[in-house]
Image (cartoon, rainbow, N blue to C red):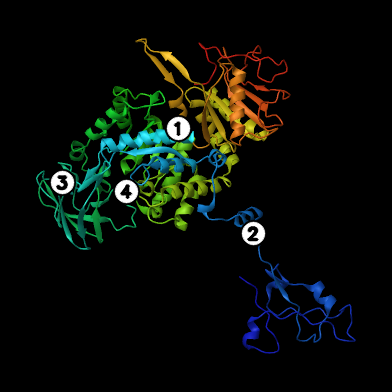
Amino acid sequence: MWPATPRDPRGGGEKEAKVWEKAAPAAAGADETGKGMRPMVPTGSSMTHVKPRMSFDFPVAESRGAINPATERPKMKLHMPKLPKKLASLLEEDTSVKEKELGTHDIVTTGTKVIVTIGPACQDVEILCDMIRNGMSCARIDLTNGDIEFHVRSIRNVMQAASIVQQMVAIMVDTVGPEIFVKSGDPETYIDGWPKWGKGASVKTGDTVTLTDCPKSKISPNRWPVTYENFAQLCKVGDVIIVGRYLSTGMEGTSVTLEVTAIVDEHDVQCVALNDAELSGLITVFIKNCSLTTVGEERQKCSLPILSSRDVEILKILSTIKNSGSDCIDFLSLSYANCKEHIIDARQTLDSLGLSNAKVIAKVETGKALANFENILHTADGIIISRGNLGMDISVELFPVLQKALIQACNSEGKPVLTTRVVDSMTSSPRPTRAEATDISNAVLDGVDGIILGAETLRGLFPVLTVKTVLLCAKQAEKTFDNTQHFSKLMKTTGFLSQLESMASSTVRVADKIQAGLIVVVTGSGRTARLVAKYRPDVPVIALTVPRIRADAFNRWHYSGRHQARQSMIVRGLYPMLAVGTADEGGIMEDCVERAASLGIARPDQNIVILYNPPGSEVPVIKLVSVDRQGQNLSRRFSSVANNMFQASSGVTLVGGSSGSESSFNEDDVGVFP
């Protein structure tokens, strides 16, 4: 409560609400010292007892005096809080997102990744190049819409754009899975392999709509056929069904909520519409809480395969495309993964197609997936929080807390977690809403690894601007992310640490204590680099991947390196880099630092922490080096330090050590982490 405002004894009116004017200079003959003229505090004011927000400046009043001591009062000062220096500096630098130019340094120093869904709005190579320059790290190929030729061209264009920009871009394939659609007829036409659908149906609040699984039914204003033949057996009276355009943003009026009022027969389900909608495009059907009902046995008999026949057919064709000598598919985004068996089945399918190196990312989008989340998290290589369907399947008031819990669980496990549907309004607007910008920041502060853009880039009007906006919002949020608290929380909640993870956490600790500017992890599969990134260091982490060529049991040669490096592109804080040049250990390190310096992330006289396995040793080592004064090479004057918690062999000599000698990599036994 504000203290009572002193009233002016001279009169009421508006004067009572105003702060009195400054006292006039002392009148002639008045006591210059002002003794005996202390102002009177109004009766009932709390200013005599506690420190008020508004206070008298007594010394100034006494020194100035007053013309009429009975009526004049000194001015009351309002103590206005000042903006924090950091916030004030941000406001001074405030410019339009369109005017900001992003460089490689901005992208490397921003840990949060941006995953882009490829569609007609961004499939061109030039647009893809612009998106990569503005922060795109992974391309998502959504098999739900578009023909095979469209997806093949999308992958080839992504690879071409990455080659032009000279940056790695991962490729993620998103499956259709057990999705149910409304059979709205064949597309009117195809434009470069992308279907152009006609108008589906219009519905008003209170209208009766019948959903049917009869094979021969055709769409009409009040009768909508669906693709699943046992659909009626999935429903019961009182169920809520959401029917709408695929990737509907919720602001387009293209989705309707239906409530089941009757099960007419074994094929027809009668519903009532709860809102108005204009359905068009590819129309999907989602039954709320379908997996959590007690009907159980009947619904399990109606289960759909986790990979549809369309998924397997397209994956078989995409498996023949090679990206720089490796498989083009880096990740498989598994839709409707409700249990660990779904993930195991998907891996077996990938193995049969020759895609054993692809990581399986489970999409959590139903209540049943939440019930089995712990098993899913342990089995999958990463998690996608599919906020579109998941937000419809659970109570809206639970979702914000649930999202935080899911992200925290993934962070503790050290597996990447991605989220969807953050800037839906940018599908048609060049600027996100305040709520959406806040949503990005909150997700980053919660610990999310990356953000997936769907309709915003698939059919949106501003695909490049959307990528830039999301990256800049994430970059600002990361400035206030508490890395120390995150590290401490993980150390408290994590029980037993493996030898590898213990060294990974120690690397982050060392980098923090010596205020290093960069961490370099020499790795083969990227596992060690991901463990380092788990502890969220506040400096960039380069995953220096050493390529390998090996022969299998059938004497067939296999090349690895690029594929594993690209799989770091969805992990927060990681920047992959392929080791090139000499096979000598020192040469690889020198080349890495030179390239880091060219990117602006290794500065003169800056300390660098390197984690690797010395050749011939199975013991991990932490090494400290520095950049020379020119900011181009390793400094030979810096004394290396080997932090070995597990009694490393003392015979190993490190680059930049006191002896000045360098050990070398053996082609048959490359000393790197798994």
The CA span between labels 3 and 4 is 24 Å
Q: Quadrant of residue 80?
A: bottom right
The one of 31 and 222 positioned closer to us in this rendering: 222
Q: Are marks 1 and 3 in contact (CB under 8 Å)?
A: no
The one of 343 and 149 positioned closer to us in this rendering: 149
**Which amino acid does the dot numbered 1 rest on?**
Ser
**Which amino acid does the dot numbered 4 rest on?**
Leu
Viewer can see residue 223:
yes
What is the total number of numbered labels drawn onto the structure image? 4
Q: Secondary structure at mark 3?
A: helix
Q: Quadrant of residue 64?
A: bottom right
Disc nearer the start of the sequence (1/3): 1
Per the image, the residue denoted by label 2 is: 83
Disc nearer the start of the sequence (4/2): 2
Q: Secondary structure at mark 4?
A: loop
Per the image, the residue denoted by label 1 is: 163
The CA span between labels 2 and 3 is 60 Å
The mark lying in front, picked from 3 and 4, is 4
